[in-house]
Amino acid sequence: MLQEKPRAQFARREALPVRRVPGWWSSLTVFLLWALGLFVVALWVSNGGITGMMTGTAGILNELGRLTGLAASYLLLVQVLGMARIPFVERAFGQDAVTRGHRITGFWSFWLMLAHIVLITLGYAADTQAGIWGTLVDFTLNYPAMLLAIAGTLALIMVVVTSLRVARRRMRYESWHLLHLYAFLGVGLALPHQLWTGRDFLASPAATVFWWSLYLGSIGAVLVFRVLKPLIGTLRAGLRVTKVEQLQPGVVQVTATGRHAAALQAQGGQYFNWRFAGPGFTRANPYSLSAAPRTHRDGSTDLRFTAAIVGDGSRRLATLRPGTRVSVEGPYGKMHAGAATRPGALLLGAGIGITPLRALLESLPTDPRTGRLEATIVQRHSDEHDLILADEIGRIADARGAQYYQLPGHRVRERASWLPEEYAHLADTEALLLLCPDIVDRDVYVCGGPGWMDAVAAALHRLHVPSNQIHIERFAL
Ligand SMILES: Cc1cc2nc3c(=O)[nH]c(=O)nc-3n(C[C@H](O)[C@H](O)[C@H](O)COP(=O)(O)OP(=O)(O)OC[C@H]3O[C@@H](n4cnc5c(N)ncnc54)[C@H](O)[C@@H]3O)c2cc1C
């Protein structure tokens, strides 16, 4: 049978403040994206899109070419907005959903862009004697800013090819990320040809205002939220490393303290992109808070994360010295108490993925109706080397009246399951129900390795846990 961990004694703490994420934030964002997309189509129609298609083959090809070009531009700008990490969007969707959306819109905008090039070329070729190659040469040499657009297209092709899973797996993260930034160049280089030759940008004042606002809004959002806000937040917080602990082989814990770090308004379980002064400063690594931010009597606040050592960046953490200056971008992510939709929670963590859940356990509010915390935390680990922060979790669970289960051992090998071999006789859904009989009425937070998380997510879907109650954060992009 599944055994609950014996409780230790721990003093009760006061409830921590929670910044809630209203459910309508995500609905509003999705609505706005669709509404703007439909507005793009409406502009195309009002600028003669449908009537142009009545004029024969060339008309159909040209008009569809225009429409696909507009849709590609729109989705590219949605991509840029997604990369801007607008706090409202980040807090409503979380990193996982934003990354998934970024990938899907990325591929769609790419295919639409290719369709635009093919359709427009065929459409113009159908009206001339120059043939397809002649039309392409004519475009390149005689149309304003077309050379820039071709360079932009090549940059976007490189970004898409290097993002295919096969290619991505073979590349170092830094190399892939650097190449990915060429997407900004691609978008930037494609803009002038749209402004100078794109009928839809110039046909009506409404179209011109719409597209300029979208372009300037997207660029502005990136500058504000990816550059200015982190810079101001970092300067204001004044974070410095105060403690570096080797918790166990391969796991290091870093605490940074800042006089005004409370102003960052982080919540336990959220993550920051961290940089530390010295060699390697240029590279930011994401780490989740493994404890709720703790404010001292003098007003300074501790931010803490716990990291598995997997490569150069994480190896460097163990060598950080107290006093090292820290720069942060964030807080991001949906792994926080403010994302809760229900009074009860089930927290499922595996390996290093348990760390944001430990912070969440500390931060979840008590049920106002009962005055109790309805929470169950489950820690999957292979062996004792993988049992991270167990003492702390035990103490918090005890202090807050939560259930704490540890599930040790290797994962079931015969099937894609989230369970350890010891419980192979149980179905994945059955084990979840044993741990938490009222699971469909709870928020479920999941963090661990990709395969394990997929198995958990599949079991949750089979149990019909509503998707807005499932909060997932992957530790790999
Ligand atoms: C939202 C989020 C929260 C995370 N929280 C934690 C945490 O609390 N504790 C923890 O141990 N790990 C966490 N990780 C994983 C951690 O960021 C990577 O292990 C770390 O960046 C690896 O860097 P490296 O130089 O040591 O290894 P590398 O060998 O450079 O990278 C190993 C793998 O880590 C991932 N990775 C590397 N750099 C980045 C980056 N800048 N952004 C995203 N992924 C990257 C890639 O998948 C890469 O293949 C988190 C990741 C994400 C995306």
Image (spheres, grey):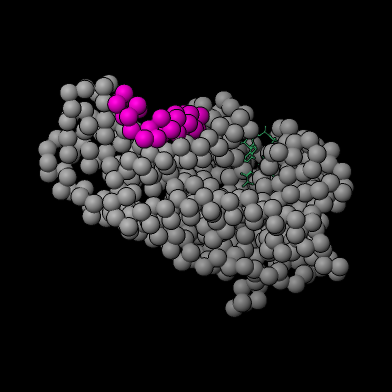
Q: Position of residue 231 (x, y in %)?
A: 69, 53
Extent of the magenta region: 136-164
**Near-viewer residue (186 or 72):** 186
Assign the C terminus to one quadrant of the image: top right
Q: Measuring from the top left, give residue 286's x and y in whole percent.
A: 66, 45
Q: Is residue 86 above or below residue 140?
A: below
State whether residue 116 is above or below residue 429: above
**Point 39% across, 52% down: residue:** 211
The quarter of the picture where residue 474 lies is top right
Q: Residue at x 55, y 65 (%)?
A: 21
Q: Position of residue 236 (x, y in %)?
A: 75, 59
Labels in figure, total: 0
Direction from residue 65 to residue 322 in the image, left or right: right
Residue placed furthest toward the bottom: 369
Q: Is residue 465 visible?
A: no
Q: Which quadrant contains ligand 1? A: top right
Of residues 432 and 160, the one nearer the viewer is: 160
Q: Hey, which quadrant is residue 168 in on the image?
A: top right
Residue 403 place in picture, x, y as percent: 67, 60
Where, by quadrant of the figure, is residue 397 drawn? bottom right
- Residue at 55 percent of width and 37 percent of height: 181
Q: Residue at x 68, y 42 (%)?
A: 285
Q: Is residue 59 left or right of residue 418?
A: left
SS majority, magenta: helix
Q: In screen coordinates, is 252 left or right of 72?
A: right
Whether residue 130 is visible, yes or no, is yes
Whether 167 is among the magenta residues is no
13 versus 38 height, above or below: below
Membership of 154 in magenta stretch:
yes
